[in-house]
Amino acid sequence: MKESLHSRIIQFSKEIGFNLVGFSPAIPLEIETQRLMRWLHDGKQATMSYMERNIDKRRNVKELFPDAKSVISLGLNYYSDGRHINSQGRGKISRYAWGKDYHLVIWDKLEDLIERIKSIEPDFSAISYVDTGPVMDKVWAVNSGLGWMGKNTNVINPDSGSWFFIANIICNSDFPKDKAISDHCGTCTACIDACPTNALQPYDLDARKCISFLTIENRGEISREFSGKMDNWLFGCDVCQDVCPWNKAFVEETSVTDFNPPTGTKSLALDEVLEMTPEKFKASFSESPILRAKLSGLKRNASFLKSDVD
């Protein structure tokens, strides 16, 4: 029965649109938690204090879901074709935010998947996460065989690169563990060499220097030490993924049209942002990840970029 359920879950996942699916036992993450604690001790979380909380839950998913036996990890491709163009007076938007907020898309897919599983296994019980709770989502993706943790700290799949969102279902069923994928970064340092702010070391990211943090999660001012180093990024940054050889070799466009609608926002005029009203901001980005930065953050970013030009 378990073998049949295992294969049906894979089938359901593909039908719903997930590109990757893997399974791993819900065991405590001892080594990964130690690494996390060292990273936090070094202050590399910047002002993301929420990462310092719920360490026990991050270590052991049974603290979140006592009946946990397995973790089902899922990957959803979000790659949309098109290049970032550096244009004076405009700020670039990270590819993941060109369309609809991925949380809204994936939550619907997860609900559909869990309902389908319960239709054939009534005793199936689960909770799911899309980077919105104390779950080490990338670690579970690696454990479940979705890919290896790259030097740029993104999970890389040998057949589809790293342009995919990760979701995890913590459930009460036992499943065989998928084989881990070995590290294929080798001697390559393309992501580290290309990082505009030197935020990357092999397998280690310092959020205090990361453009994605500085333009999204950051609630303070952007230090002038980054003047001339923001590479024209208004929201997020894709540099370490754009230069990755695995993303250049294996690129397939997403089948999720919500991730790249015809009116997708790939860049914004800096003056337009600086003059934007709260009403315009909410109307334009009500279902966009850009909402995460808030209008004040977006204006701060635009002002910083504009000061580099002026």
Image: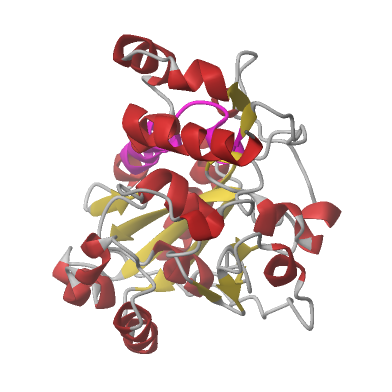
The residue at 36%/53% (across/down) is: 131
Image vertical order of residue 169 relative to residue 296, above or below? below
Query: Residue 220 at x, y = what percent?
Result: 31, 49
Query: Residue 201 at x, y = what percent?
Result: 59, 78
Whether residue 110 is in magenta: the answer is: yes
Query: Residue 32 at x, y = what percent?
Result: 39, 82
Towards the viewer: 283 or 199: 199
Whether residue 70 is in magenta: the answer is: no
Q: Quadrant of the C terminus?
A: top right
Residue 56 as seen in the image, left or right of residue 1: left
Q: State which region is magenta.
A: 92-116
Towards the viewer: 156 or 127: 156
Q: Main secondary structure of the magenta part?
A: helix
Residue 177 as seen in the image, left or right of residue 291: right
Query: Residue 163 at x, y = what percent?
Result: 64, 49
Towards the viewer: 52 or 301: 301
* Residue at the front extreme, as displayed: 310
The quadrant where residue 18 appears: top right
The residue at 79%/76% (across/down) is: 188
Image vertical order of residue 6 relative to residue 77, above or below? below
